Image (cartoon, rainbow, N blue to C red):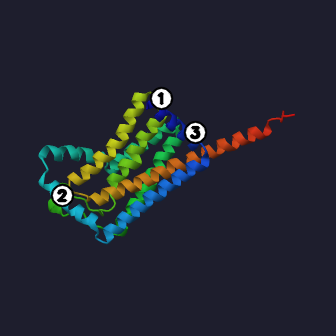
Amino acid sequence: MRKQTSFIVNRARLWLENPWPFAALVGAALLYIGALASGLAEDVLDNESIVRVDGWLVHWLAAHRTPFGIGFFEAVSFVGNWEVATLVVVAAVIFLWNRRRRAALTLALTCAGSELVVYLGKAGFGRPRPPAIFSVLTELDGSFPSGHANISVALYALGFYLLFRAAHSPRLRGLWLVLAALFPLMIGFSRLYLGVHYLSDVLGGWGVGLWWSILVVGVPDFVRRRSAANTQAADLRSRPNTAK
């Protein structure tokens, strides 16, 4: 079974080294996530079933909070604050600029682009936060989409993914993948637990962060694959024809 899985993975990797299948995969992912995010936004505007789930979950979590849980998730949420995220991005860009400039630009562009979308979304939707009686923290901006959820993907998950790509040790690669999944889940849930966001806000923030991450990672990867394919084709054309 392991040999079969390894064979399939290797074949898929070789197939995706072709620029056009890779572009089709990236384009399909962007369209799919964009459709999900736009559908979610429409459901929020039209007060569809997700809004009823939002209200139920806010009440349920407020009734089951504990002092330890509040303290713990306040610390988790703090990691997603814009001040902390800005410091992390600036430090990462400075550290990576002379070593891995492409990774530095990837993080900076993803965070900047996704945060702009979040800012416009909050201003455009103007969705109020959950009632103050259910909230532990006081937030003054709009609720949809969640900026914390966005940055948990656009900065932290993407950063760990870039570390995964750069690592050679299987253990390190596994660790980075686990952290790439854990950070968005923890930060997103912290916003729900503290009563400052609805579930749809968090889902929307994740969608924005994921869309921008795929875009900013996918476009340079496509350019690299196309350049390699063109170089290989030119090399083949330049070889002398030895056939008789």
Say few, some or many: other residues with alpha carbon within 10 Å of mark 1 (under 14 / 14 to 19 / 20 or more): few
Which residue is pictured at 21% across the width and 52% down the height?
A: 193
Pointer 2 or 1: first along the chain: 2
Pointer 3 or 2: first along the chain: 3
Name the element at disc 2.
loop
- In the picture, the disc for residue 135 is 2
- In the picture, the disc for residue 14 is 3
Cα gap from disc 3 to disc 2, whole angstroms: 50 Å
Query: Which-is-in-front pick, marks 3 and 1?
Result: 3
Measured as percent of width and height from the top left, residue 215 is found at: 50, 52
Say few, some or many: other residues with alpha carbon within 10 Å of mark 3 (under 14 / 14 to 19 / 20 or more): few
Which residue is pictured at 78% across the width and 41% down the height?
A: 237
Tag 2: amino acid: Ser
Tag 1: amino acid: His
Q: Quadrant of residue 32?
A: bottom left
Q: Quadrant of residue 34?
A: bottom left
Q: Is residue 139 above or below residue 108?
A: below
Residue toward you, 89 or 71: 71
Tag 3: amino acid: Leu
Measured as percent of width and height from the top left, residue 98 is found at: 53, 36
Cα gap from disc 3 to disc 1, whole angstroms: 19 Å
Q: In the rendered image, which residue does mark 1 sit on?
A: 168
Name the element at disc 3.
helix
